[in-house]
Amino acid sequence: VQLVESGGGLVQAGDSLRLSCTVSGLTFSTYAIAWFRRAPGKERKFVAGITWSGSNTYYGDSVKGRFTVSKDAAKNTVSLQMNSLKPEDTAVYFCGADTRMRTDMMTTEWEYDFWGQGTKVTVSS
């Protein structure tokens, strides 16, 4: 199983970025994907996620209304569209896969079975 994040970079406050998490080794509709981020000196924290069915999405309070998570079955990819970026969004962003086909989205990192290596997002003021 492999998860690969891409799309990070350096942007200015107010800009947009689109992160992608490409998954291989798992059947597409059998896992939930969550995005977490780790800001400098802080713990990894839930940002957004989409359930295994793709029918439900969840967002952390700090990104609601600005970030959108979506699945693309044809590309085995889950994307995180990030708009109106703020300096406090600066972090390394990770995607994690939960393969237990649960009804609810898990927001704690130990519930996830597989992780990508992360992609860095830096938002300058």
Image (cartoon, rainbow, N blue to C red):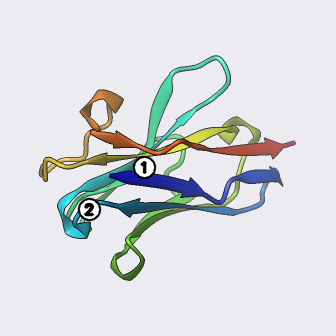
Label 1 CA crowd tier, 10 Å (few <14, some 14–19, many 20+): many
Which quarter of the rendering shows the C terminus? top right
**Residue at image point 35% right, 31% down:** 109
Residue furthest to the bottom? 74
Q: Is residue 51 left or right of residue 59?
A: left
**Residue 45 position (above or below residue 87):** above
x then y, percent, for residue 79: 49, 65
**Is 10 displayed left or right of 79 in the figure?**
right
Q: The residue tagged with tag 2: helix, strand or loop?
A: loop
Of the residues shown, which amino acid type is indicated by label 2?
Answer: Asn
User: Residue 63, percent across and down?
Assistant: 53, 48
Rendered residue at 70%/46% (across/down): 121
Q: Residue at x 37, y 82 (%)?
A: 74
The residue lying at 33 percent from left, 42 percent from top is 114
Left or right of 12, for residue 104: left
Instruction: Give the left or right position of residue 30, taking residue 93 as reference.
Output: left
43, 26: nearer the viewer = 26
Query: Gap between marks 2 and 1, in whole Å?
Result: 11 Å
Q: Which residue is mark 2?
A: 56
Return the disc, 2 or 1, that comes first in the chain's sequence. 1
Q: Quadrant of residue 29?
A: bottom left
Quadrant of the rendered image containing residue 75: bottom left
Q: Is 119 placed above or below 41 here?
A: below
Residue 15, horizontal then vertical, whole percent = 77, 60
Amino acid under label 1?
A: Ala
Which residue is under mark 1?
48
